[in-house]
Image (spheres, helix red, strand yellow):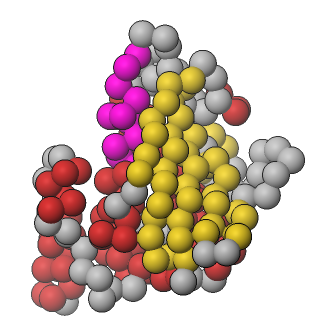
Amino acid sequence: MLLFILQIHRYRKFSIFYEDKVKTPTVKPDFMIDEKLALLGIILPSPPKPAGSYIPVVITGKLVFISGQIPIKDGKVAHLGKVLKDISIEEAQKAAKLCIINALAQIKNELGSLDKISKIVRVSGFVNSTPEFTDQPKVINAASDLIFEIFGTKGQHSRIAIGVASLPLNSCVEIDIIAEIV
């Protein structure tokens, strides 16, 4: 039990800046992804159903493309509106993390295991915001940080963070992922 508590403590210690995490990974590579999720207190939900005419996951060669995920929880959009006008940056960061959790649920549903991911290649983050809002990277950093927490150096990725006038179902954030699989 003490070892488990020490592991949880070790996994919860991060620096504030992603660059610091890149230099000193906080996740041991010999842990299975499901174990890492459990240590972080993350339970993957049933993957959300597509909100349109598309499929949630496409695999071609060694790449898996996850369609844009919005912060759906229990069948409803959990975080609605424009950042700063309707919701705070902190709430939008929670939404970004939920988008990542939903994306991982989609991958696990398709592949059977998240351990088949060898690299997170790209994260695209869209933030429903007003024209004067310029902190989209601050919102999407929460998603990038969570990916790094879970996957360690395999989670280091390229990224875009874009402000948009609206998103499906009035979601505050939408995120898609490209990953490499073994």
Q: In the image as oriented, which residue stretches furthest toward the right?
A: 53
Q: In front: 73, or 180? A: 180
Q: Residue at x 53, y 65 (%)?
A: 179
Is there any visible trace of residue 148 in the rendered image?
yes
In the picture, residue 28 is in which quadrant?
bottom left
Left-right relation of 151 to 43:
left
Is there any visible trace of residue 98 in the rendered image?
no
Q: Which residue is drawn at 50% across and 20% down?
A: 129
Q: Relative to 23, is 84 above or below?
A: above
In the picture, residue 149 is in which quadrant?
bottom left
Q: In which quarter of the image is the C terminus?
A: bottom right
Q: Give the range drawn in magenta.
A: 133-143
Q: For the stretch drawn in magenta, what is the main secondary structure? A: helix
Q: Residue at x 19, y 51 (%)?
A: 19
x and y percent of residue 58 in the render?
72, 64
Q: In which quarter of the image is the N terminus?
A: bottom left
In the picture, residue 92 is in which quadrant?
top left
x and y percent of residue 156 in the render?
34, 61
Q: Relative to 30, is 114 above or below?
A: above
Q: In front: 110, or 45? A: 110
Is residue 105 one of those drawn in magenta?
A: no
Left-right relation of 20 to 92:
left
x and y percent of residue 83 in the render?
46, 23
Q: Which residue is drawn at 78% across and 45% down?
A: 51
Is residue 141 one of those drawn in magenta?
A: yes
Left-right relation of 132 to 60:
left
Q: In front: 171, or 18? A: 18
Q: In the image as oriented, which residue stretches furthest toward the front?
A: 61
Left-right relation of 64 to 158:
right
Q: In the image as oriented, which residue stretches furthest toward the top?
A: 132
Q: Relative to 114, is 174 above or below?
A: above
- The number of discs equals 0
